[in-house]
Image (spheres, helix red, strand yellow):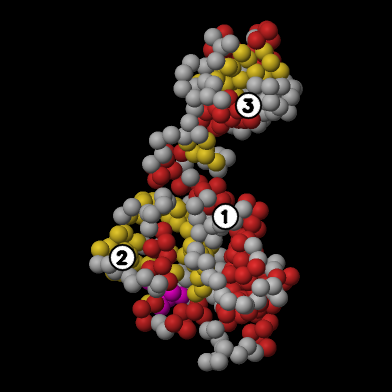
Amino acid sequence: MEKNRILTENLAVGYGKTPLIREISLRVRPGEIVTLIGPNGAGKSTILKSIIGQLERMGGTVRLVGKDMAGMKEREIARHLSVMMTERIRPELMTCKEVVSMGRYPYTGPLGVLGREDRERVEEALSLVRAEELADCDFGCISDGQRQRILLARAICQEPEVLVLDEPTSFLDIRHKLELLEILKELVRKKGLAVLMSLHELDLAQKVSDYMVCVKGDRIAACGLPEEIFTTDRIRTLFDITRGTYCPRLGCVELAAPEGQPQVFVIGGNGSGIPVYRRLQKQGIPFAAGVLHENDIDCPVASALSAHVITERPFEPVSETQFRRAAALMADCREVVCCIGTFGPMNEKNRELAKLGGRKTVFLSDGDCAGI
């Protein structure tokens, strides 16, 4: 049995007569989410539209469940593959249930009359996207998040083996982004769907995807598992980031650190320093941080935003050497901010640092940085 639901070989895509991207070789297996990421205009949508046949391919082949799509009829393709693209559809005077029912067209006759099984599939699709209460609502009168769920239900209604989505979280607030991707992940797990999609939100792509494809300009820049792709250097190169940084451990971006000599020394740890680092960055105040263990959640944010950070090896008590380095750096700062309320054996030296600051030390609790 064919293991790949989608397989492209030496695919070339573009507009007119000039290929924009060549030698695209992708594969999507059952129960797998493959996600395209890259800058705006890199060609992610062009690749997806070429795969589904919305754009004419300029070379190479696309195989769907083992068959060359070039030799497949539209209705046959629709029984294996469904799509959810960024273009907003605006059906006139249709209920959500009627929009979902459109997904049954590969199975109905010329008149599109739904049979019992078709109606059951419509109800099942609405249930899977948790939209039963929207069935009788006018599609034109519901929110963007609700529309995306209905369009996903329409795609599911086709009973596809492959689902292709172009930026499915566009126009959605964070709640609806999370809901839609959670539903998608559940479908992949329970029904074994093969999903190929593009996403702009790197944090979500990192968390939901099984395999990544990086698209940049005229080429596929890299492919790999999320843990291979989401590194600071690779994301910086892919998006040509010159200011700010991407923190792979937290799956977030941070703005550029303020320039200049540190004016504030922050004693943090266990996440307590992060709100302070970001507050100082917003105010344009250069700061130093320490002593942080390298596996502390504060460490990647401090490394991105501070002028200097003093670190210690994981699971080791703060050493006298690192304590002295921090003390020397702290002595040149006008203020010391201590975010830690409780000190343990591993960071006892940080208690000494806070005391060493004397009157310069401001003690905060629970990340309360309103007074900074």
Q: Is 66 part of what is drawn in magenta? A: yes
Looking at the picture, how far across and down is residue 39, in whole percent? Answer: 41, 50
For disc 3, the marked residue is 276
Marks 3 and 1, the one that precedes in the sequence: 1
Please, what is the three-letter code of the amino acid marked with disc 1?
Val
The residue drawn where x is 45% and y is 53% is: 37
The 10 Å Cα crowd at callout 2, few under 14, some 14 to 19, many 20 or more, is few
Q: Residue at x 50, y 55 (%)?
A: 199
Residue occupying the far left of the picture: 17
Q: Which residues are magenta?
A: 62-67
Q: Amino acid at mark 3?
A: Val
Return the disc, 3 or 2, that comes first in the chain's sequence: 2
Q: Are marks 3 and 2 in contact (CB under 8 Å)?
A: no
Residue under label 2, please give it: 15
Q: Which residue is mark 1?
A: 208
Relative image position of residue 157 (x, y in whole percent): 60, 76
Q: Is residue 186 visible?
A: no
| Residue located at (46% from left, 38% from top) | 232
Q: Which mark is residue 341?
A: none
* Magenta-drawn stretch contains 118: no
- Mark 2: amino acid: Tyr
Q: Residues within 10 Å of mark 3 (few under 14, many from 20)?
A: many
- Measured in 3D between alpha carbons, the distance from the residue under mark 2 to the one under mark 1, in whole angstroms, is 31 Å
Identify the element where label 1 is drawn: helix
- The answer to whether residue 53 is above or below residue 240 is below
From the image, which quarter does the C terminus lie in? Answer: top right
In front of the other: label 2 or label 1? 2
Res 135 visible = yes
As drawn, is 117 to the left or to the right of 76? right
Vertical arrangement, residue 327 with respect to residue 168, above or below:
above
